[in-house]
Image (spheres, rainbow, N blue to C red):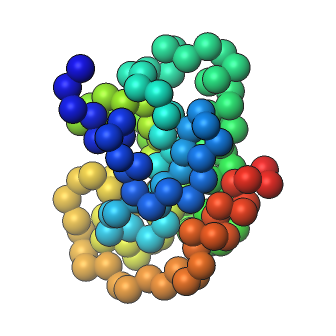
Amino acid sequence: MMHCVFCSGDGGQKVYDDGRCRVVIADEPFAGFCRVIWNAHVREMTDLVPADREHLMRIVFRVEAALRALLEPHKINLASLGNLVPHLHWHVVPRFTDDSHFPNPVWGAAKRAAPERSVPLNLAALLAARVAEG
């Protein structure tokens, strides 16, 4: 297997880990950009047994709900691509109408400079608590 960044590191600031998957705040220029990463190296959702698929999606939905409550974005983008890092993970990206790329995907070209967006100083702790409580 080639070097996998999600096998060799957390993939961001880890805020939750239940042994099967983890939630990280990604080092990306978008406020609240999170990843939900399956801990074991698998490439696709269908590599998981149905119970594990359901568990992973439950955590993705908890992260989405937490970010909606904490940041009040205009929209949440959910994506599982894995073309560059073929290790199963989901992107959970809060989107704001004034972000640099809106309404285009965050991976595309910027349309404008984004204003500075404040997030709660304790976002990691708040996110962790909401994901853990379900």
Residue 16 appears at what percent x and percent y? 60, 53
Say above or below: 25 vs 87.
below
In the image as oriented, which residue stretches furthest toward the right? Answer: 133
Determine the image quadrant of residue 100.
bottom left
Determine the image quadrant of residue 69.
bottom right
Determine the image quadrant of residue 117.
bottom left
Residue 88 appears at what percent x and percent y? 43, 30
**Does residue 131 appear in this view?**
yes
Residue visible at 47% across and 49% down? 35
Q: Which one is nearer the viewer's eye here, 16 or 33?
A: 16
The quadrant in which the N terminus is found is: top left
From the viewer's perspective, is 30 left or right of 63? left
From the viewer's perspective, is 123 left or right of 89? right
Q: How many marks?
A: 0
Residue visible at 65% across and 61% down? 128
Residue visible at 40% across and 76% down? 98
From the viewer's perspective, is 6 left or right of 22? left
Say above or below: 109 vs 57.
below
From the viewer's perspective, is 125 left or right of 28? right
Residue 102 appears at what percent x and percent y? 37, 64
Say above or below: 44 vs 20.
above
Q: Which one is nearer the viewer's eye here, 80 or 95?
A: 80
Residue 33 appears at what percent x and percent y? 45, 60
Residue visible at 41% across and 26% down? 41
Q: Which one is nearer the viewer's eye here, 119 or 17?
A: 17
**Does residue 104 appear in this view?**
no
